Amino acid sequence: MRTFIKLAIFLAAALPCLASAATYQWRDDAGVLHFTDDSDRIPERYQKRVTETDSAAAEKGAAPAQKKQEAPAASDASGSAAKPAAQPVAATTRAKLEAELKRLKEALVPKKEELSRLQHKWMVSKGRTPTAKEIAEFEKKRAKGKATYADNPYVNKSPLSSTIPARVAYRNKLEEVQKDEARVAQLEQELQALK
């Protein structure tokens, strides 16, 4: 019975060592980190970027022993070891810039529509739509050469109405649209430089 207990304790202690398997990790073109314990699930195009982590060392709290998995294709002798590390960073930067550019372009469409609406509101608040009778009277006075600014039916003469709020809203929206357009141009230049 003692031998059986000793054997069971030995197997229980040795079981984690026997069951330990390697964990593989790699970054894709978008910079996303992937993990798997099955080397067959690693896409071929990321084979060069895979690092193998010993899970038994990680479980014990020690620093994980990482070793580069052998690449199926030979790398050129010019020292392109820095390229795989830099490539995901450039791809991530490109993806962020493209996402921001897309978001800004989509947001500009409703902003420009709002700008057009605000400009129309401002123009309408500057004047008024006269009736046919008022237009006829103004044209008669103008034909005689007696029309004055006060006679013009298109001008809003009410002291209670002001064009200032409409003008301020238009100018604020115009400034916002111009700022977004400048940022779009800057992003397009940055993306062009990354090519």
Image: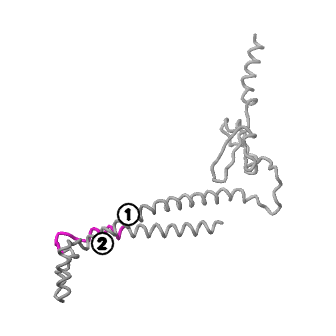
> Which mark is first along the chain, 1 or 2?
1
Residue type at numbered disc 1: Glu
Q: Relative to the observer, which residue lies in front, 16 or 174?
A: 174
**Range shown magenta:** 157-172
Residue extending farthest bottom:
145
Label at residue 123? 2
- Residue 179's place in the image compared with 62, above or below, is below
Query: Does 89 sit left or right of 119 as displayed?
Result: right
Residue 110 at x, y = what percent?
A: 42, 61
Question: Where is the N terminus found, in terms of image quarters?
Answer: top right
Give the SS element for disc 2: helix
Q: Relative to the observer, which residue lies in front, 62 or 153?
A: 153
- Residue 2's place in the image compared with 148, above or below, is above
Residue 89 at x, y = what percent?
A: 64, 58
Q: Which residue position is annotated with label 1?
A: 114
Query: Does 105 sit left or right of 29 as displayed?
Result: left
Question: Where is the C terminus found, in terms of image quarters?
Answer: bottom right
Residue type at numbered disc 2: Met
Seen at 81% across and 63% down, the residue is: 78
For marks 2 and 1, give the CA distance. 14 Å
Residue 158 among magenta residues: yes
- Residue 7's place in the image compared with 136, above or below, is above
Seen at 37% across and 67% down, the residue is: 116
Seen at 65% across and 38% down, the residue is: 61
Query: Does 13 sit left or right of 144 as displayed?
Result: right
